[in-house]
Image (cartoon, rainbow, N blue to C red):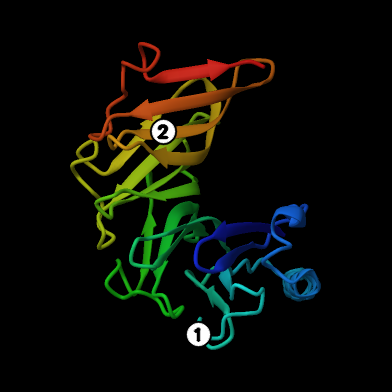
Amino acid sequence: MKILLFKSLKYTIFLIFVSISCLPDVKDLKKEINIVKKYQILDLLKDLQNQQSNSYYYPIGELDLDFNGELDLDFNGTGIVTTNISSFSDDRAYAVAIQNDGKIVAAGYTYNGSNYDFAVIRYNTNGTLDTTFGSSGIVTTNISSSSDDYAHAVAIQNDGKIVAAGYTDNGSFDSDFAVIRYNPNGSLDTTFNGTGIVTTNISLNDYAYAVAIQNDGKIVVAGATRNGSNSDFAVIRYNTNGTLDTTFNGTGIVTTNI
């Protein structure tokens, strides 16, 4: 189970039922969070993980903490929200972002019965699904009918558009960077590459895991690529319309073998 802390007026812990990894260093937080309560919450998360261990159900969930580390009961009445996207019960979240209005955007992927699709969910500040976003607060995007598409990062632009990044199978036992931009209502933003979707082949097995928006609106995506023998850092910068920014290393792409 991976736990990510996002510091704003409250601490939001985003739940990913995958594997248990290390907690954030409490040294930087101990002035504001009661450590005993923090570990009580960890026990709760472990219990939730154990409850899921005998099935393929990976709920997308959020756990909202008050400033003192207690569950925020204004968030769904319990501080916890889980959302089942598809009837095939394989929904996983890997990223979260907070809009300026406080709404919460979570991104990951869902199984559609044949393959995996990008999945983005937007919650109201009280934990309910935001029905002004997509279909009842949920948007799924199939990049190709035969591909597995995985979102691992999400960012919010200043204009409210949502950028999700990850990777997609290109049909040749290979993966490419994949970036999708959504309008604030959840529809695909067709000013971005004409379709709202951009895929970029760097080399072999390209995986995007992070995305950030520059002040000028350019989109920076980072991850890894195989160079034939091992993996390298990979960073791509896109213009606001989805084209590669050739002022960035001449191609828009940089790979680094450390």
Q: Position of residue 160 (x, y in %)?
A: 28, 55
Residue 200 drawn above or below residue 97: above
Report the front residue among 250 and 28: 28
- Residue under label 2, please give it: 220
Q: Position of residue 190 (x, y in %)?
A: 19, 45
| Residue 244 lies in quadrant | top left
- Residue under label 1, please give it: 74
Tag 1: amino acid: Asp
Secondary element at image label 1: loop
Tag 2: amino acid: Val
Mark 2 neighbour class, 10 Å CA radius: few under 14, some 14 to 19, many 20 or more = some
Name the residue rendered at 23%, 34% in the picture. Answer: 241
Q: Left or right of 209: which side holds 52?
A: right
Report the front residue among 188 and 123: 123
Mark 1 neighbour class, 10 Å CA radius: few under 14, some 14 to 19, many 20 or more = some
Residue 76 drawn above or below residue 11: below
Name the residue rendered at 63%, 69% in the picture. Answer: 57
Residue 239 drawn above or below residue 10: above
Q: Residue furthest top?
A: 250
| Residue 27 lies in quadrant | bottom right
Q: Looking at the rendering, in which quadrant would you find the C terminus?
A: top right
Residue 170 in view here: no
Mark 2 vs mark 1, CA separation in Å: 35 Å
The disc placed on residue 233 is none
Report the front residue among 217 and 240: 217
Decide which of tag 2 and tag 1 comes sooner along the chain: 1
Name the residue rendered at 56%, 70% in the picture. Answer: 62
Q: Looking at the rendering, in which quadrant would you find the N terminus?
A: bottom right
Report the front residue among 204 and 39: 39
Q: Left or right of 33: which side holds 148?
A: left
